[in-house]
Image (cartoon, coloured by chain):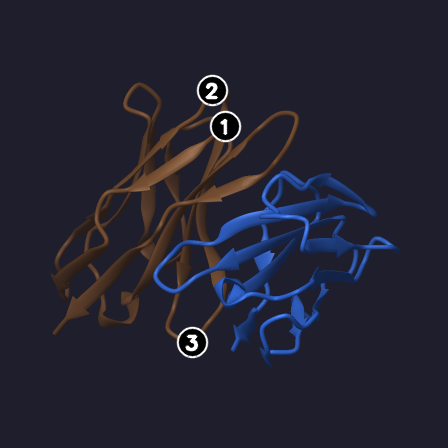
Chain colours: A brown, B blue
Amino acid sequence: AQSVTQLDSQVPVFEEAPVELRCNYSSSVSVYLFWYVQYPNQGLQLLLKYLSGSTLVKGINGFEAEFNKSQTSFHLRKPSVHISDTAEYFCAVSGNTGGFKTIFGAGTRLFVKA
Amino acid sequence: GAGVSQTPSNKVTEKGKYVELRCDPISGHTALYWYRQSLGQGPEFLIYFQGTGAADDSGLPNDRFFAVRPEGSVSTLKIQRTERGDSAVYLCASSSTAQETQYFGPGTRLLVL
């Protein structure tokens, strides 16, 4: 079974500052890892995903995440945020063999201030 | 092309009633997922289909919940004897295969009075 912990429920940050949203997972099998974003009054959309290969994954809107197997983490980063990045961000994990049930974290609310 | 659509967008019902929620996946997508999202929480996995069959239904909370996908396209989530605790946004997603990116619909907001 897999589980996901998003360590911060809310992250306030000023515009143009860097941000890191933390995600830790647990799993007894190899995993795929994802970050999704949910803008106000919109559906979930994929920001980026790790399936295999390079542990540094680049996504849309300037976001990137690094898979760290030893620390079971997949933190999301952006070097300079914009007001438009204000949204809810969800980390998710699925097993990569034998089934693809996806488990989501509780979410981190990123609030970018002017 | 068209994305994932869900109907209705909002559903208000009374405790004890039966409801059906519909999901139209992206054409050609073989994998379809149902999730439930309560206020302030992440999506909670309910069930996923590969084609017509339920490949994993371990997230269904109890036997009041049932989902079908008879022709491998449209899916219906059915909830019997609704309870107030069933109130949530029900999300559907589809992907071309189980390992690929999931595309989410806008959700159905269910309110049980």
Count of numbered badges drawn on the protein: 3
- Give the amino acid type for the residue marked by disc 1 in the picture: Ala
Q: In this image, B18 relative to A13: left or right?
A: right
Q: Looking at numbered disc 2 in the image, what kind of residue is underneath it?
A: Ser
Residue B8 showing in the rendered view: yes
> Which element carries disc 2, helix, strand or loop?
loop
Q: Amino acid at mark 3?
A: Asn
Find out whether the residues at labels 2 and 1 contact each other: C-beta distance under 8 Å: yes
Task: Tell me the crowding category of disc 3: few under 14, some 14 to 19, or many 20 or more residues within 10 angstroms, Cα based.
Answer: few
Q: Nearer the viewer, mark 2 or mark 3?
A: 2
The chain that hosts pointer 3 is: A
Q: Are marks 1 and 3 in contact (CB under 8 Å)?
A: no
Distance from Cα at disc 1 to Cα at disc 3: 31 Å
Residue found 72% across the figure and 54% down from its top: B66
Chain name for mark 1: A
Q: Which mark is residue A1?
A: 1
The residue lying at 48 percent from left, 42 percent from top is A103
Q: Which mark is residue A28?
A: 2
SS for tag 1?
loop
Looking at the rendered structure, whether the residues under marks 1 and 3 are on a common chain is answered as yes
**Residue density around tag 1, few if under 14, some if 14–19, many if 20 or more, within 10 Å:** few
